[in-house]
Amino acid sequence: MCWDTSSAFTPVALALRGPATRKIVRTLGDAAHLLINDWPSDDGEEYVAAVKACVDAITGKISPERFREALLLAADEAGIAALTVVPVGVTERRPDLRSAVPR
């Protein structure tokens, strides 16, 4: 079982309500804990799919990234804001906006 695997798992930050207001999910173990202990509702269709996907990812039946997609759908269903976390030092190539502005 791969509880703490983070390979190919892009971290996601979730803004929850209540005592556990902000969580960063980096591993399948983080996700399992969040879904079981801190999720605001346990009766949504996407929530149930995310729990199953988490178990499937832990047992190696699906990729961690595929689970992440299910987690994001469950977050959307529950009205939880989600942001992709970009580690410090990782830069993204962006177009130079100055060249796109007419002078």
Image (cartoon, rainbow, N blue to C red):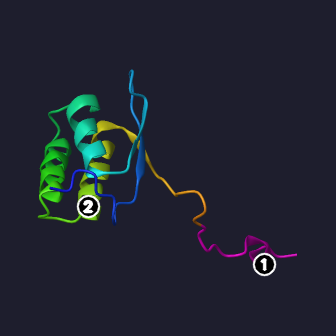
Q: Which mark is residue 20?
A: none
Is residue 61 found left or right of 33 in the rendered image? left
Taking the spot 29% from the left edge, 63% from the top edge, the residue there is: 65
Residue 60 sits above or below residue 70 on the image: below
- Which quarter of the rendering shows the C terminus? bottom right
Residue 33 sits above or below residue 9 on the image: above
Whole-percent x, y for residue 3 in the image = 22, 51
> Do labels 1 and 2 touch, CB within 8 Å?
no
Q: Nearer the viewer, residue 103 or 86?
A: 86
Disc 1 secondary structure class: helix
Q: Which residue is mark 1?
A: 99
Is residue 72 found left or right of 96 in the rendered image? left
Query: Which amino acid is tagged 1?
Result: Ser
Is residue 53 found left or right of 22 in the rendered image? left
Distance between the alpha carbons at the discs numbered 1 and 2: 38 Å
Whole-percent x, y for residue 45 in the image = 15, 44
Whole-percent x, y for residue 75 in the image = 31, 43
Q: Which secondary structure type mostly characterizes the magenta part of the structure?
A: loop
What span is colored magenta in the figure?
91-103
Which class describes the residues within 10 Å of circle 1: few (<14), some (14-19), or many (20+)? few
Residue 55 sits above or below residue 77 on the image: below
Q: Which residue is mark 2?
A: 64
